[in-house]
Image (spheres, rainbow, N blue to C red):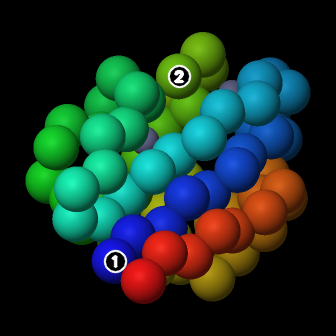
Amino acid sequence: MGVVYKMSCSRCGTHFDHQAGVGFFCSCPTCGDSGDDSAPFFCPVCNKRFDPTVEDSLEDSLLETLLWD
Ligand SMILES: [Zn+2]
Ligand SMILES: [Zn+2]
């Protein structure tokens, strides 16, 4: 169970993957290892905040969402 957000930051243009869910390790510096796929995360370069629970939060920056069972 998990999700990978392929992101292109709308503020600074950085591309990064945010991975969340059981058994995932995310390389974002602010994610920690809570494994919570609805927790907010941050751009590793400009610290722009993305919140998966807020409908418009990811819209401008999200390239692709990959779901894992
Ligand atoms: Zn992350
Ligand atoms: Zn950024």
Percent x, y of residue 17: 60, 41
Is any part of residue 49 visible from this angle?
A: no
Where residue 44 is drawn, which disc sits there?
2
Q: Residue furthest front?
A: 69
Task: State the residue lying farthest toward the top.
Answer: 45
Instruction: Write the residue at 60% across / 16% down.
Output: 45
Q: Is residue 2 above or below residue 63?
A: below
Say left or right for 51 vs 46.
left
Does the Cβ of the disc 2 residue fall within 8 Å of ligand 2? Answer: yes
Work out whether 27 lies above or below 41: above
User: In the image, what residue type sits under mark 1?
Assistant: Met
At 37% from the left and 38% from the top, the residue drawn is: 26
State the CA–CA distance, disc 1 to disc 2.
Answer: 24 Å
Mark 1 or 2, nearer chain start: 1
Give the number of the mark in front: 1 or 2: 1
20 left or right, relative to 32: right
Say whether residue 25 is visible: yes
Q: Quadrant of ligand 2?
A: top right
Q: Which residue is mark 1?
A: 1
The percent position of residue 24, horizontal first and vertical second, equals 31, 51
- Image quadrant in which you'd find residue 5: bottom right
Callout 2 amino acid: Pro
Q: Residue at x 20, y 37 (%)?
A: 32
- Picture layout, residue 1 above or below residue 41: below
Q: Quadrant of residue 55?
A: bottom right
Q: Secondary structure at mark 2?
A: loop
Front in this rendered view, residue 26 or 49: 26
Circle 2 Cα neighbour tier, 10 Å, few/some/many (<14 / 14–19 / ≥20): some
Element class at badge 1: loop
| Mark 1: C-beta under 8 Å from nearest atom of ligand 1 | no
